[in-house]
Amino acid sequence: MKILLTGGAGYIGYALVQQLMMAPEVSEIVVYDNLSRRSYAFFDHNDFRSKPLRFVQGDILDGRKLAQTIKGMDVVYHLAARVTTPFADFDAHHFDQINHWGTAQVTLAAEEAGVSHLIYLSSVSVYGTSDEPVSEDFPPNPQTYYAIAKLA
């Protein structure tokens, strides 16, 4: 099975790649990331030798490059997103481009390439803040633009 991870160069992508490397059915992993968050956890480790692993620097808004990279993949994990917090500088236009149009680009490219599974990762931020532990049954209460985008 060939797998593509969008936004896969960060912490969650690194952890997911570690798990996928242990799966015997996985034959190839491609990490597609624009490195905009300056998070290089993916590159800080040399324990990715058991399976073919390739890094492609690219943006999910680049439909042509994304479509070219996604060809031949069986599964796509969509992790790429622009994260905001209530205290962060907020560029609404860029946020909307990445989180909405970028996700649409990934979905379209996966559909056109005949990808069998597209897995979209949400975030605990969709539940807002709470003094009690939350579960998937907890009612959504998004409090940031990022959380709203992840809920949609």
Image (cartoon, rainbow, N blue to C red):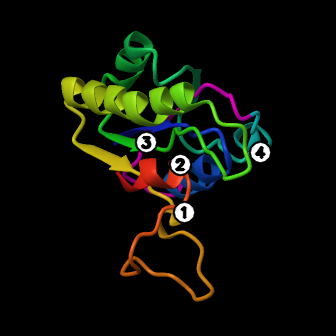
Residue at mark 1: 125
Residue type indicated by callout 1: Ser
Q: CA distance from mark 3 to mark 2?
A: 15 Å
Residue at mark 4: 45
Q: Secondary structure at mark 2?
A: helix
Residue type indicated by callout 4: His
- Expressed as whole percent of the image width and height from the top left, the position of residue 98 reads 49, 30
Asked whether, in this view, residue 27 is left or right of residue 86, the answer is left
Eye-nearest disc, 3 or 4 = 3
Residue type indicated by callout 3: His
Please tell me which residue lies in front, 72 or 8. Answer: 8
Q: Earlier in the sequence, mark 1 or mark 4?
A: 4
Which label number is shown at residue 78? 3
Q: For the residue carrying disc 4, how many other residues have a C-alpha within 10 Å: few (<14), some (14-19), or many (20+)? A: few
**Residue depicted at 36% across the width and 81% down the height:** 137
- Please identify the quarter of the rendering in which residue 64 is found: top left
How many marks the image carries: the answer is 4
Q: Earlier in the sequence, mark 3 or mark 4?
A: 4
Residue occupying the far right of the picture: 44
- Please identify the quarter of the rendering in which residue 128 is found: bottom right
Residue 121 seen by the camera: no
Q: Main secondary structure of the magenta part?
A: loop
Residue type indicated by callout 2: Tyr
Residue at mark 2: 146
